[in-house]
Image (cartoon, grey):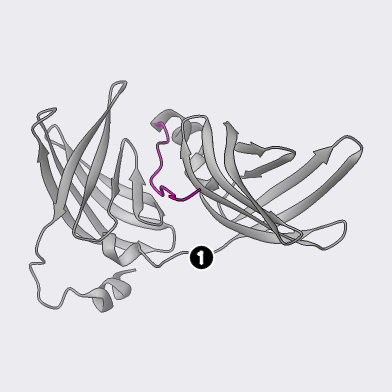
Amino acid sequence: MTTIQSSSQISPANERVYHQSNLLGDWKGSSKENNQPVEFKVVNIRGTKAQVEYTHNGHTERGFADVNGATITFGNVTIATRNGQKAAMEFSAGTAKWTAVLDKQASTADQNKLVGSWAGYSAANGQSASFSVLSIDGRDAQVRYTLNGVTHQGTGTVYKNTVMFQKAQITSDDGKSGSVVFQVGRQSLSVPVKKLPSTSPSSSSSSVNKLA
């Protein structure tokens, strides 16, 4: 796997019912039976497939797993979480079975890049986008976006370089340009956006941390 895409495509319906974004991230723990360390990384979720990395006994397997509701199954391993902080893992192959409780690992490297106001227009679909990430605290982001003249505001979910909230998500690799994806009916519309200049010279990463 030479390239890893960190942006995800989780349907608003699945997010509302199953909170599938809770599964995203790096999970670590030990098996209850023999105390062997295990790690399960969910890189992204796209529909019914998840890109994952599974490490056990010093060996890492990479590939695509099946997503079913709030669970992900990769070969003989199944992982599920309710709160996005702790996950239950089960390995089952014939008569062999073991379980583990995994903890979500913090990931904040790319978060400050997302904070700010973003705007853009897509000539391809005639949609304009306005998306503001007001602050980030761990995996929670205070966001506001405008779609078709209606403004939505609340707490979104952060994973690496993506913030997801209701029917929209914003992704940026460099903190300067990115894309906003809106769910309109059954369509996903993408709009290229750029970060707007800060209105205050004091708005730096240090002030972002205070907000977060």
Residue at screen point 38% across, 46% down: 7
Tell me residue 148's x, y (percent): 14, 32
**Closer to us: 187 or 177:** 177
Quadrant of residue 174 within the rendered picture? bottom left
Q: Quadrant of residue 68?
A: top right
Q: Is residue 66 left or right of residue 128?
A: right
Q: Is residue 51 above or below residue 142?
A: above
Compare residues 123 and 144 and report the one nearer the observer.
123
At 21% across and 45% down in the image, what residue appears?
145
Q: Residue furthest front?
A: 2
Please give left or right for residue 89 compared with residue 161 in the image: right
Percent across and percent down for residue 71 are 62, 37
Which residues fall within the magenta stretch?
Answer: 1-11
Q: Quadrant of the C terminus?
A: bottom left
User: Disc 1 marks which amino acid?
Assistant: Ala
Q: What percent of the width, then of the height, locates residue 201?
A: 10, 76
Identify which residue is drawn at 40% across, 57% down.
Answer: 160
**Residue holding disc 1:** 106
Q: Is label 1 in a helix, a strand or a loop?
A: loop
The residue lying toward the viewer, choosing from 45 and 132, is 45
Estimate the x, y position of residue 65 in percent, counting from the top left.
Answer: 59, 37
Q: Callout 1: few (<14), some (14-19), or many (20+) C-alpha neighbours within 10 Å? A: few
Q: Main secondary structure of the magenta part?
A: loop
Q: Is residue 114 magenta?
A: no
